[in-house]
């Protein structure tokens, strides 16, 4: 159910929609990011429907959320383990799951998409959802690298479409980049900013420019790290140690790429190198391509640049 801070909407023409107070959120994609977003939204009192392609994935996702909540309460409720367990159960009650995005968006104030980093797949999803969702529902993508306006172009709600770019791991990372396109209404943008604050995050406003703020700076750094290594100028271990101890980063570039997922990483590079084929910043990495080809996708698959377990 949505609440409008300025006026009740009748007929939901876009001009009638005022700051939507977001209560019910649909999160599409129960991978690393979708799980984290659902967890944080449910922990802050939102009712959340989590959607993925099959029930096995959804079961695993909910288990993952429970595990992450346990880590959170271990610290937050160190002296009150019973209250911690109560909190976990309360949060889990706020989460329901579905494999049918079209039917669940009908009750949503906000849809956050966190599926695979592929423009066509995201457009197909939003195009279907656009026909089923109420007019007041705001759509947002968590894309790392694709233009929000390109994703939004598959819908008829350009004014109610924006970017909400979270950071991994979502329960720990405080930042959300809120992205408005030239068509995003001020009301939508404000609703997304307010929503980010209700999650306990710090939002920053970004234009719909490639990589927004963080990834525009982070991706060239990560790519230069792998090229340094491919040229034989440093082992991955030494590069990681150097950036942690010399630059104060919590993870080195190879550890971070493994943590993000090398498939997602490759999707981003492929997209940017197609967009700017002559820009040496975004040139392909043979080493990364080989790892992905071999199914070594980083931490989530047990091996990437490093082995896990
Ligand atoms: C070289 C390859 C080149 C390839 C080219 C690449 C190009 C493209 C890549 C672009 C990627 C773009 C991705 C994107 O869009 C944006 C991103 O998200 S970028 C990633 C941003 N994230 C980071 O930078 C993470 C950096 N790491 C950290 O902050 C810490 O390492 C981390 C918090 C993850 C873990 O902390 P650490 O001390 O290392 O380990 P601990 O396990 O002890 O955890 C500390 C603390 O945190 C709690 N915790 C950790 N994870 C979770 C969780 N998921 N849920 C709940 N709690 C968690 C843990 O319990 C600990 O709590 P304590 O109470 O302190 O024990
Ligand atoms: N991994 C990271 O560090 C970050 C990723 N992102 C972005 O978030 C999005 C998701 O990334 P991850 O969570 O890492 O990916 P992931 O691979 O962990 O999860 C994606 C999930 O989406 C599901 N999915 C795919 N197509 C679907 C569909 N049509 N309907 C419903 N579910 C579908 C998959 O089954 C999978 O569970 C991508 O756009 C990525 O660029 C943004 C910030 C950080």
Image: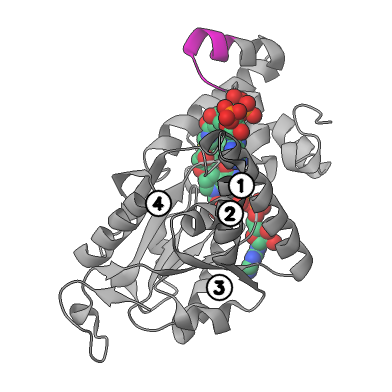
Q: Which mark is residue 199?
A: 4
Q: Which scheme is used to colour this image of the protein?
A: one colour
Residue at position x 64%, y 52% in the image: 65
Q: Secondary structure at mark 3?
A: helix
Of mark 1 and mark 3, the one earlier in the sequence is 1
Q: Are marks 3 and 4 in contact (CB under 8 Å)?
A: no
Specify which label sits upstream in the sequence, 3 or 4.
3
Q: CA distance from mark 3 to mark 2?
A: 36 Å
Q: Find out whether the residues at labels 1 and 2 contact each other: C-beta distance under 8 Å.
A: yes
The residue lying at 69 percent from left, 57 percent from top is 61
Viewer-side label of 3, 2: 2
Tell me the CA gap for discs 1 and 2: 6 Å
- Pointer 1: what residue? 82
Residue 179 coordinates in the image, percent (x, y): 33, 53
Q: What residue is shown with label 2?
A: 86
Q: Give the label, 2 or 4, closer to the camera.
A: 2
Which badge, 1 or 4, comes first in the chain's sequence?
1
Q: Quadrant of residue 213?
A: top left
Residue 2 falls left or right of residue 85? left
Give the magenta range.
Answer: 242-250
- Find residue 281 and report its horizontal and vertical position in percent: 50, 30
Q: Mark 1 to mark 3: distance in Å?
A: 41 Å
Local crowd size for mark 4, using a 10 Å CA cut-off: few (<14), some (14–19), many (≥20): many
Label 1 and label 4: CA atoms lie apart by 24 Å
Image quarter of residue 302: top right
Name the residue that disc number 3 marks: 125
Q: Secondary structure at mark 1?
A: helix
């Amino acid at each position: 159910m949505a609440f409008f801070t300025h006026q009740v909407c009748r007929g939901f023409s876009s001009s009638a929609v005022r700051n939507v107070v977001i209560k019910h959120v649909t999160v599409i994609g129960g991978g690393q990011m979708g799980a984290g977003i659902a967890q944080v939204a449910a922990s802050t009192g939102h009712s959340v429907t989590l959607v993925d392609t099959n029930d096995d994935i959804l079961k695993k996702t909910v288990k993952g959320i429970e595990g992450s909540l346990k880590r959170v309460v271990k610290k937050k409720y160190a002296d009150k383990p019973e209250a911690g367990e109560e909190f976990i159960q309360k949060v889990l009650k706020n989460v329901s799951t579905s494999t049918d995005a079209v039917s669940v968006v009908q009750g949503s104030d906000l849809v956050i998409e966190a599926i695979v980093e592929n423009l066509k797949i995201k457009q197909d999803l939003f195009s279907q959802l656009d026909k089923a969702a109420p007019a007041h529902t705001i759509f947002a993508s968590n894309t790392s690298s694709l233009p929000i306006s390109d994703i939004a172009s598959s819908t008829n709600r350009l004014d109610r479409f924006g970017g909400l770019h979270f950071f991994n791991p979502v329960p720990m990372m405080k930042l959300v980049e809120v992205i408005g396109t030239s068509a995003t209404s001020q009301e939508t943008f404000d609703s997304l900013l307010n929503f980010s604050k209700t999650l306990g995050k710090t939002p920053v406003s970004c234009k719909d420019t490639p990589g927004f703020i963080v990834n525009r700076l982070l991706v060239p750094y990560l790519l230069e790290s792998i090229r340094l290594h491919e040229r034989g100028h440093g082992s991955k271990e030494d590069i990681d140690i150097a950036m942690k101890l010399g630059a104060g980063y919590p993870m080195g570039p190879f550890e971070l790429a493994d943590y993000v997922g090398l498939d997602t990483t490759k999707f981003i590079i492929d997209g940017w190198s197609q967009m700017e084929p002559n820009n040496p910043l975004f040139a392909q990495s043979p080493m990364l391509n080989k790892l992905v080809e071999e199914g070594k996708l980083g931490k989530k698959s047990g091996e990437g640049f490093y082995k896990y377990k």
